[in-house]
Image: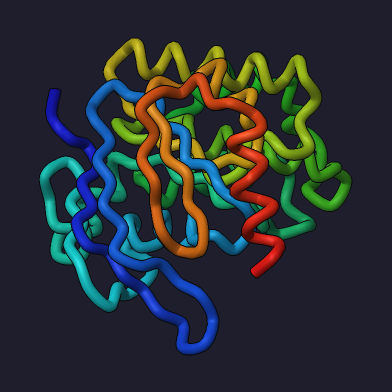
């Protein structure tokens, strides 16, 4: 299988604030890759660098075999990205937000969007300002999934979702991956990685540690958090 994401020697500094240091990471086609780590460890910086939203200080990133800077628009056409914070215009209806996301991509994804909304119990008649955090997250998931991209990148997608909706979310991911997609899942939730992911890595202090197995021991995982808090 080919590498859908390939990162070599990625470094990004924010001055005195921590960035990422010499990150090397490969995600193969058809993988559900778990990306673990405490807040501030460098997960979101790595993701934003992959998408070309941040200018890296050093290193090379290729997505679908393409350079993530020179071929950014072509890459993003086949990516479904969900950021950790779901920001929308408060006065817009959910249905309008979903259609707006589709219009930006220049397609009609209404049939797929309706399927996802039904599975995740999304009320498309409400306005964004009426929604809880969890329901805003669901809208963000629909916007990321509706065009059936080749690559999903989710940054903390399940916070605020009830357990049943979390299960439906991962069922959807599995269906898309079984149909040929790939998923990078950034999360704090160890059980999600152990249950759904096929490979995983842990970020700590801006550095990445690849894992041989996704059957991660909880005590070992918590040590990463304890050591981070002591810094």
Q: Is residue 180 left or right of residue 202?
A: left
Is the C terminus in the top left, top right, bottom left or bottom right quadrant?
bottom right
Q: Can residue 44 be seen at all in this image of the molecule?
A: no
**Outermost bottom residue:** 15
Vertical comparison of 109 with 87: above or below: above
Q: Residue at x 28, y 21 (%)?
A: 30
Q: Residue at x 70, y 62 (%)?
A: 229
- Estimate the x, y position of residue 169 in percent, counting from the top left: 60, 21
Depth check, front residue: 90 or 226:
226
Name the quadrant containing residue 4: top left
Name the quadrant containing residue 87: bottom right
Q: Residue at x 73, y 39 (%)?
A: 159
Depth check, front residue: 102 or 135:
135
Vertical comparison of 228 with 77: above or below: below
Q: Can residue 58 be seen at all in this image of the molecule?
A: yes
- Estimate the x, y position of residue 50 in percent, counting from the top left: 32, 56
Colour scheme employed for the rendering of this structure: rainbow
Is the N terminus in the top left, top right, bottom left or bottom right quadrant?
top left
User: How many numbered badges does the structure rendering display?
Assistant: 0
Q: Is residue 192 left or right of residue 183?
A: right
Q: Residue at x 36, y 73 (%)?
A: 12
Q: Is residue 91 left or right of residue 78?
A: right
- Estimate the x, y position of residue 74 in percent, counting from the top left: 20, 51
Depth check, front residue: 214 or 68:
214
Q: Is residue 36 left or right of residue 1?
A: right
Depth check, front residue: 102 or 55:
55
Name the quadrant containing residue 135: top right
- Estimate the x, y position of residue 154 in percent, counting from the top left: 51, 41
């Amino acid at each position: 299988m080919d590498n859908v994401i390939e990162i070599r020697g990625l470094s990004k500094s924010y001055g005195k604030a921590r960035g990422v240091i010499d990150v090397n990471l490969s995600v193969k086609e058809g993988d559900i890759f778990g990306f673990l780590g405490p807040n501030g460890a460098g997960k979101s910086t790595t993701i934003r660098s992959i998408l070309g939203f941040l200018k890296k200080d050093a290193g090379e990133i290729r997505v679908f075999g393409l350079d993530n800077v020179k071929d950014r628009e072509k890459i993003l056409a086949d990516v479904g990205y969900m950021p950790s914070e779901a920001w929308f215009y408060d006065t817009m209806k959910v249905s309008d937000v979903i259609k707006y996301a589709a219009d930006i991509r220049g397609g009609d994804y209404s049939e797929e969007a309706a399927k996802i909304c039904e599975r995740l119990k999304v009320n498309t008649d409400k306005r964004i300002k009426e929604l809880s955090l969890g329901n805003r997250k669901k809208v963000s998931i629909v916007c990321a999934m509706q065009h059936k991209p080749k690559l999903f990148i989710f940054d903390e997608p399940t916070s605020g979702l009830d357990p049943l909706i979390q299960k439906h979310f991962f069922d959807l991911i599995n269906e898309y991956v079984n149909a040929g997609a790939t998923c990078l899942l950034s999360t704090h939730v160890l059980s999600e990685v152990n249950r759904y992911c096929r490979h995983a890595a842990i970020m700590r202090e801006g550095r990445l540690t690849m894992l041989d197995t996704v059957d991660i021991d909880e005590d070992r995982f918590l040590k990463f958090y304890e050591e981070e808090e002591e810094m």
